[in-house]
Image: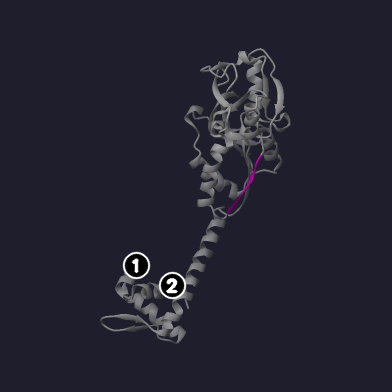
Amino acid sequence: MELRHLSGFVAVAEELHFGRAAERLHMAQSPLSQQIRLLERDLGVKLFDRTTRSVRLTAAGKALLEPARHLLAEASAVRRAVQAAHLGEVGRVTLGFAGACSYSALPVLTRAITSELPGIELVLEGQTYAGEALGRIADGTLDLGFVALPVRRGISARVVRMERLLLALPDSHRLAERDEVAVEELAREPFVTFPLSRGSAVREATVQACHEAGFAPRIAQEAPDSYNLLALVGAGVGVAVVVESARHIHLEHVVFRPLAGEGVSVLPIALGWRSGDRSAALAAVLRIAERVLPTPAEDGGQGSRKR
């Protein structure tokens, strides 16, 4: 009993017409009739009652229809699994992310991978800040992560988003009515930011902007994530430099204002991975990422970098 014979049988059983079944299978009617005769001879039963006007399933044909459909579906699943393995579309990929900047890109990427690469087990590891992600990618405990530029030697990266930096402050703050705020005006303000030990790119951008403005930021409190950071801002603990994606977190008593001045306008966010990683599963994920998270035009076409 051959799969092609079962496929022909199912087509005739569903169409109850040899001509239409042959068209559906993109073959001539005579070879299809031959397939059915061979299948009947192999099983030792008659599967169809045929007249010049009609085709009907026999009791044996009716009994065979569902098992035949099941066998064909199983064979198709086996074929897809083998092809997926050959193309690297099976396996496990760990992805580290943290902060609002990754939240905007993460759903787009994960939905595409889940839909197009069902054989890939995508393991998401939250609270993995940019600096921490680089270290874990380098030591092999993470396959892929959202990182900031520049990256270290041995890491490849491609910019997937350019995040504008904003100032988050309480709605009762003296600067809340401004259209934009210069970094110099924050010299005496307490800051809320992400943990120093985790390698936050946003924290590094905050410190750099303040140093370029001639002062060191006074860190009043650290927060583990964007939600808690903005909650502390709303509570009046301090101000915070955040990426524009943080606007999607709606909390009372928090307003966002652009930062004035050069060098603090945008923060490039990239996907990073080990340059020498030969994982076919990772390569498949990167192909999806390149399509659904294209390098932004603001990057000037220099999104892919290696160190």
Q: Amino acid at mark 2?
A: Arg
Image location (x, y in percent) of residue 45: 43, 86
Q: Classify 173 as above or below 133.
A: above
Image location (x, y in percent) of residue 138: 69, 38
Q: Classify 118 as above or below 46.
A: above
Left or right of 9? Residue 192 is right
Left or right of 2? Residue 12 is left
Range drawn in magenta: 120-126
Q: How is the image coloured?
A: one colour
> Going 71% across and 30% down the picture, which residue do you hit?
195
Left or right of 231? Residue 63 is left
> Going 51% across and 40% down the picture, which residue do you hit?
290
Image location (x, y in percent) of residue 69: 46, 72
Nearest the eye: 193 or 254: 254
From the image, which quarter does the C terminus lie in? top right
| Residue highlighted by disc 1 | 24
161 drawn magenta? no
| Residue highlighted by disc 2 | 4
Q: Amino acid at mark 1?
A: Arg
> Going 54% across and 48% down the picture, which residue do you hit?
113
Which SS type dominates the magenta stretch?
Answer: strand
Quarter of image, res 230: top right
Image location (x, y in percent) of residue 178: 53, 16
**Mark 2: few/some/many CA within 10 Å (<14, 14-19, 20+):** some
The secondary structure type at the circle numbered 1 is helix
Quarter of image, res 305: top right
Residue at the far right: name it: 197
The secondary structure type at the circle numbered 2 is helix
Q: CA distance from mark 2 to mark 1?
A: 13 Å
Mark 2–mark 1 CB contact (< 8 Å): no
Of label 2 and label 1, which has the lower sequence position?
2
